[in-house]
């Protein structure tokens, strides 16, 4: 089965608190414990690759894949610099990144690898890989989140990554780095007083978590526009990760979902979630959103055939 190429998927928050200050708040500690549990599960799996889609690595033109075999530097988060430095040294799978670019281009996308020293890897990717793969037991590939990519482009990106996995005979754990709600406090707060910014945000976060727990990933992908309209966060956070995760994992509802932690991170909603392919399903739905195999641009504007 094609689904055998994905061991499981994870949805984790981009904020550095579980990495740099897990002791500052009981919720941060629970998120850290959930990360640690996921690390153990990755180690016990048959995966030979970790693929990270990070909403805190925005790209403007096309899609970028981190391909520096040894990506090493020291990072300081823009918002939470007071938590300290984030040194990192990651092993990237340059060959797989190049394959993803090839497959993306063959499906009509614009893509490239990034391979140079001191490239500024983002906070979310550093937090996720430092906690999920601290000893570089598995090579990784980090995928950017294009700020202007629509649903079709994001779905095709996920399918291109599946193409690369199947051609290479690889098995992966896929990781989305993203908040749920993303309204944060604009004034300093005591970590002990951290909470979800508003009741409405908390209510919608919990609705999202219900979908994840029931394994309804494709349903969540289909409904993500409505969710975005309700919790009013940046689109790169709200629905794009759901589109990418659903496409990369196979576009169905056949998952066993588990919520390992849900906590506030400076007002935003942070969760550690696992989705494991399963044989059962909550049922096939008649979806409103169309499926797409090749990206031809927004309303054919970028269709190469029209430009020739």
Image (cartoon, rainbow, N blue to C red):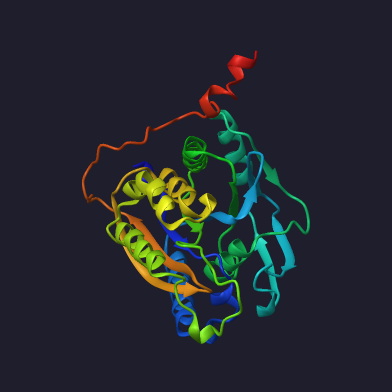
In percent of width and height, residue 290 lies at: 37, 32
Is residue 93 visible in the rendered structure shown here?
Answer: no
Quadrant (top left/top right/bottom left/bottom right) for the N terminus = top left
Above or below, 303 against 146 in this view is above
In percent of width and height, residue 3 lies at: 36, 46
Quadrant (top left/top right/bottom left/bottom right) for the C terminus = top right
Q: Residue furthest top?
A: 308
Task: Depth check: give the residue in front, 40 or 46.
Answer: 40
Task: Depth check: give the residue in front, 3 or 28.
Answer: 28
Question: What residue do we see at 54% from left, 29% from top?
Answer: 298
Question: What residue do we see at 45% from left, 49% from top?
Answer: 239
In percent of width and height, residue 166 lies at: 46, 40
Question: What residue do we see at 49% from left, 28% from top?
Answer: 294
Above or below, 57 against 24 in this view is above
Question: What residue do we see at 63% from left, 34% from top?
Answer: 110
Quadrant hosting residue 99: top right
How many marks can you see? 0
Quadrant hosting residue 261: bottom left
Determine whether, in the image, residue 100 is placed left or right of residue 87.
Answer: left
Q: Residue furthest right?
A: 117
Is residue 19 visible in the rendered structure shown here?
Answer: yes
Determine whether, in the image, residue 217 is placed left or right of residue 51.
Answer: left
Task: Depth check: give the residue in front, 269 or 14.
Answer: 269
In percent of width and height, residue 277 lies at: 33, 53
Determine whether, in the image, residue 41 is placed left or right of residue 150.
Answer: left
């Amino acid at each position: 089965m094609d689904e055998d190429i994905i061991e499981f998927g994870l949805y984790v928050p981009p904020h550095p608190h579980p990495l740099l200050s897990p002791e500052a708040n009981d919720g941060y500690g629970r998120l850290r414990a959930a990360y640690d549990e996921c690390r153990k599960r990755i180690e016990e799996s048959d995966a030979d690759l970790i693929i990270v889609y990070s909403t805190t690595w925005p790209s403007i033109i096309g899609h970028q894949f981190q391909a520096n075999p040894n990506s090493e530097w020291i990072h300081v988060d823009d918002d939470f610099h007071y938590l300290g430095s984030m040194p990192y040294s990651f092993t990237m799978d340059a060959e797989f990144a190049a394959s993803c670019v090839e497959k993306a281009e063959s499906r009509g996308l614009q893509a490239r690898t990034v391979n140079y020293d001191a490239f500024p890897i983002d906070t979310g990717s550093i937090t996720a890989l430092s906690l999920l793969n601290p000893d570089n037991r598995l090579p990784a590939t980090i995928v950017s989140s294009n700020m202007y990519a629509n649903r079709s482009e994001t779905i095709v990106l996920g399918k291109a990554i599946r193409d690369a996995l199947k051609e290479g005979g690889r098995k992966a754990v896929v990781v989305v780095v993203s908040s749920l709600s993303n309204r944060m406090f604009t004034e300093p707060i005591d970590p002990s007083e951290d909470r979800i910014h508003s009741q409405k945000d908390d209510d919608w976060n919990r609705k999202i978590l219900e979908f994840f727990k029931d394994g309804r990933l494709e349903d969540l992908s289909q409904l993500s526009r409505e969710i975005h309209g309700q919790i009013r966060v940046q689109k790169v956070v709200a629905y794009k990760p759901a589109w990418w995760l659903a496409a990369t994992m196979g576009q169905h509802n056949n998952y066993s979902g588990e919520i390992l932690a849900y906590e506030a991170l400076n007002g935003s909603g942070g969760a550690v979630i696992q989705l494991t392919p399963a044989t059962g399903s909550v049922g096939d739905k008649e979806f409103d959103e169309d499926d797409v195999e090749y990206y031809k641009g927004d309303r054919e504007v970028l269709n190469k055939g029209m430009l020739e």
